[in-house]
Image (cartoon, coloured by chain):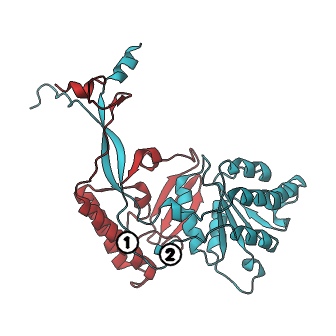
Amino acid sequence: MSYNITNPMAKGSNRVENGVLLTPPPRNVGNKEHYQRMNYLYQLAMWNTMSGNDGGEQALARLYAKNMDLVSKRTRAEMLPQLKRTICKKCHRVLVPKKTMRVQTDSGSLQLVCSCGAVRNFPIHLNGGYRCYAERDENLISM
Amino acid sequence: MSLKNLDKQYAQRRQTYRAVLDNPFTNEGSLWPHVKDQQQVWELIQTILLARCRALADAEVPAPEWPLGITTSFNEIVTLLQHENDDNDQSNRSPLLLLVCNKDHGVSSVVLQQIPLLAYMSPRKVTLVQLPRGALATIQTQLKSDCTEGLLLAWGDELQSLVNQITAKIDQPQLPWLDQVKFEPTALKLLKTTAPLKKPVEKAGKK
């Protein structure tokens, strides 16, 4: 029986707050290589998009971004929403205003229109200051 | 003590941490240009720009007849920022002053994420200014408009001196990944979540 875990008064136990046992953050993260690979692929995709070496179709940049997405899914290495918003779900272009996408608001939604025609809607009229769980500073710890 | 409070004393869930990859390029420090003397810049904007807008609005002068251009509409701002420079058009040479209430509650983070990129990618010279907390309410009062997106774009030759004064107190925006990419180390973060302590009870009949 793990009395140390459930009993907040036990010696050497962690603190309990609102029914949640608080534990210290880990010092290291497993499978860091996957994150490093995704980071490198994203930067390659961005560089290829901005340099314009591969024409208007951005074939190489899209390939890198798609690889990044695949690595993320296969290895369950997650990305923050701020990062995912910069990649088109349909054609995997890196979304840069004026270069590969158009930004507009329409009936209370922010629309990111990719060059491929895919539209992503973000409702902003109901609760403008809304930030999702992963976007709130108190829930994120830098390593 | 209520049963609910008693329950909270005993752990039902434990805190866990999930590794997540952050955008290597968009750290808050470099996205928004640093304002050296925030108070003075805000006072300048209030006295030179907003007070004048208030006077024009009180006099019920129609917006198109104002000597300086003002817009709070996101779509108009995007159109003006992305408008190509035409040397023959006199109005296109006037400086653009983009004020952003990025510290106020009620301004969408998705909209704010786009603004520095839009300003940087604009072919025109844009002075991007982040305003202090509480600026949104002041702008709404002075302009007598809702200004929901927390953005205000002003342009016109009369703003040249104001823009010069503000530019001297603001660092140049630096988005190096849009000009020449330099490898950035992995921005790994930990996301705090919780997981149940007890294993879920298996239903009878299931093996």
* Colour cyan belongs to chain: B
What residue is disc 1 on?
A43
- Residue situated in front as seen by the camera: A9 or A122: A9
| Front of the two marks 2 and 1 | 1
Chain painted red = A
Which residue of the protein is positioned furthest toward the top in this rendering?
Answer: B1
Mark 1 residue crowding within 10 angstroms, few (<14) / some (14–19) / many (20+):
many
Seen as rendered, the residue at the extreme front is A11
> Residue at horizontal 85%, vertical 68%?
B67
x, y percent for residue B55: 87, 56
Task: Please name the amino acid that badge 1 sits on.
Answer: Gln
Secondary element type, mark 2 = loop
- Residue at position x 44%, y 83% in the image: A52
Location of residue A11 in the rendering, given as x and y in whole percent from the top left corner: 26, 26
Amino acid type for the residue under numbered disc 2: Lys
Q: Is residue B89 above or below residue A13?
A: below
Disc 1: host chain: A
Q: Is residue B9 above or below residue B47?
A: above
Q: Which residue is mark 2?
A: A99
> What chain does mark 2 sit on?
A
Relative to A63, residue B64 above or below: above
Q: Residue at x 59, y 59 (%)?
A: A105
- Relative to residue B186, is residue A99 drawn left or right? right
Q: Position of residue B157 (x, y in %)?
A: 80, 74
CA distance for labels 2 and 1: 16 Å
Q: Quadrant of the C terminus of chain A?
A: bottom left
